[in-house]
Amino acid sequence: NTDARYGLPNPLRELGERGSAMLYWPAWLSMVEWDDLERNELIRVGRLGETVDFGKLPVQLQTPQMAEYVGASATVAPSFEVCGSPGEVANEPRLGHRYSVWAYGEDDHTPGREADGQEDYMENHKRMVWYTIALESADQLRQRTAWALAQILVLSEVDVGKQEEVEVWTSYYDIFTRHAFGNFRDVLREVTYSPLMGSYL
């Protein structure tokens, strides 16, 4: 951080080491730097004296250490998938899908930010899912066939206007993955009944 670069004490680290909830902004830092810090790096959790539910904390703060510190315990209520795609499974963070990281522009990341704090935009989530499956899946021939089918029966984000809705886009693409080695008539039937294609047409 800037303070460390100039040999100044880190006010946020000092705050944590003191065990206080009061941040004294150093006189040598301008309010412009506070605005930058607040906009880019500080995560709002709550106000002094408030009770905050661990489950409502930002994902970056829901670490095992924080859970242990505040005495949070996991409780899983019985549930079932209501409207999942055929063959859909839950995300498994232990398999490496923990962070909302998206490489954008010419930079892979924002310098000075940890991997789990990178910028990420909702409209990129479907791409993140697609890249992971298309590039890491063991059935590469199926993935390439699905891609070819998707180039024939196309949709446009611009015309549909559902850029941030991940589930509808991944469900649509799953049609091609499911029927990559099947009958083209089955592909046409599912595409015809797809809500996304209905909106597009």
Image (cartoon, grey):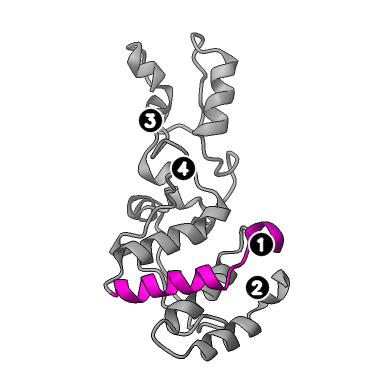
Callouts 3 and 1 close, C-beta under 8 Å: no
Q: Give yes or no for residue 116 being in the magenta stretch.
A: no
Q: Amino acid at mark 1?
A: Lys
Q: Is residue 35 left or right of residue 8?
A: right
Which residue is disc 4 drawn over?
A: 104
Compared to residue 43, the image places residue 181 above or below, namely: below
Which residue is disc 3 drawn over?
A: 112
Question: Marks 4 and 1, how far apart in space?
Answer: 20 Å
Q: Amino acid at mark 3?
A: Gly
Percent across and percent down for residue 181 are 39, 85
In this rendering, the label closer to the viewer, 3 or 2: 2
Percent across and percent down for residue 1 are 38, 23
Question: Marks 3 and 1, how far apart in space?
Answer: 32 Å
Q: Residue at x 38, y 40 (%)?
A: 108
Q: Describe the element under mark 4 as helix, strand or loop.
A: loop
The disc at residue 196 is: 2
Callouts 2 and 1 close, C-beta under 8 Å: yes
Reading the chain from its start, which is encountered first: label 3 or label 4? 4
Percent across and percent down for residue 161 are 70, 60
Reading the chain from its start, which is encountered first: label 4 or label 1? 4
The boundaries of the magenta stretch are 139-160
Reading the chain from its start, which is encountered first: label 2 or label 1? 1
